[in-house]
Image (cartoon, rainbow, N blue to C red):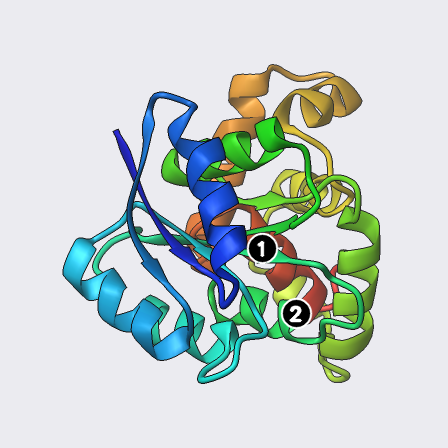
């Protein structure tokens, strides 16, 4: 059973998410929180596998809470799924930098929310496909380091760099394998080594690294 903590200042949103997630059968909402500080406390108390984190909340935003939870966590759990309206939400990019593993829109389809929670619980990152390009391009504009050079690329082999670049374009492992004419298992192997080299926990953090270091 996947344990989930819901964090949103609107009770009706939390109630709706609870119904959607628990109807899936393999997900249990173990706690709710209405602001950042209470989310940090609940994360320690209930040890969820995934936290659905709102960004803008009175009494403490999700960005600060994400940083605190990521800093305090042991291992890979809990994974943080940023759930936002996106419009003018500058905190999204900071949340990804702070260590969030996923990003999805509040108006997504119910099955997309369930799938996102399952993917994060399985150790996979997620950025909503409907806004992937917009998120990444804006992230790059705001966060790319001006002085990034070839040193970052030298960390990876040529094949690993190719795979990271295709990943940054929003491709799945299967799509990357088709593009490079290799097996999916080969893509997974190269990507795993690349992530280990740069210290990325998941696919989202790998893309963030690629943009921060000027590979894209």
What is the C-alpha distance between the residues marked 1 and 2?
12 Å
Report the residue at 20% width, 53% height from top: 47
- Residues at badges 1 and 2 in contact (C-beta under 8 Å)? no
- Which circle marks residue 8 in the picture? none
The residue singled out by tag 2 in the image is 93
The residue singled out by tag 1 in the image is 83
User: Height in image: 55 above or below 77?
Assistant: below
Q: Image quadrant for the N terminus?
A: top left
Report the residue at 46% width, 38% height from top: 117
Mark 2 crowdedness (10 Å alpha carbons): few <14, some 14-19, many ≥20: many
Residue that lies at the very extreme toward the front in this rendered image: 12
Q: Nearer the viewer, residue 60 or 98?
A: 60
Give how far across and how far down residue 160 sits, in percent: 61, 42
Mark 1 crowdedness (10 Å alpha carbons): few <14, some 14-19, many ≥20: many
Q: Nearer the viewer, residue 148 or 63?
A: 63
Q: Mark 2 falls on what kind of element?
A: helix
**Residue 3 left/right relative to 79:** left
Q: Quadrant of residue 112?
A: top right
From this viewpoint, is residue 158 visible? yes
From this viewpoint, is residue 72 visible? no
User: Height in image: 134 above or below 88?
Assistant: above
Q: Image quadrant for the C terminus?
A: bottom right
**Residue 139 left/right relative to 189:** right
Give how far across and how far down residue 208 sits, in percent: 63, 61
Q: Mark 1 falls on what kind of element?
A: strand
Give how far across and how far down residue 92 sits, in percent: 64, 67
Report the number of numbered marks: 2
**Residue 28 left/right relative to 204:** left
Report the residue at 42% width, 50% height from top: 196
User: Height in image: 162 above or below 39?
Assistant: above
Tell me which label, 1 or 2, sits earlier in the chain: 1
Give how far across and how far down residue 192 sits, in percent: 46, 39
């Amino acid at each position: 059973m996947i344990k989930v903590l819901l964090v949103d200042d609107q009770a009706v949103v939390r109630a709706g998410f609870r119904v959607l997630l628990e109807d899936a059968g393999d997900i249990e909402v173990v706690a709710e929180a209405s602001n950042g500080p209470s989310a940090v406390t609940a994360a320690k108390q209930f040890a969820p596998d995934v936290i659905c984190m709102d960004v803008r909340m009175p009494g403490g935003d999700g960005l600060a809470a994400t940083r605190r939870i990521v800093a305090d966590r042991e291992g890979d759990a809990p994974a943080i799924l940023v759930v936002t309206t996106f419009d003018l939400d500058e905190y999204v990019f900071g949340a990804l930098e702070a260590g969030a593993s996923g990003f999805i829109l509040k108006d997504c389809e119910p099955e997309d929310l369930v799938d996102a929670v399952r993917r994060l619980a399985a150790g996979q990152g997620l950025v909503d496909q409907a806004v992937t390009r917009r998120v990444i391009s804006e992230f790059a504009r705001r966060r790319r380091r001006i002085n990034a050079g070839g040193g970052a690329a030298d960390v990876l082999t040529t094949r690993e760099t190719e795979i990271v670049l295709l990943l940054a374009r929003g491709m799945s492992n299967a799509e990357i394998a088709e593009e490079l004419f290799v097996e999916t298992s080969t893509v997974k192997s190269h990507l795993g080594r690349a992530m280990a080299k740069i210290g990325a926990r998941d696919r989202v953090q790998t893309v963030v690294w690629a943009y921060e270091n000027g590979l894209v």
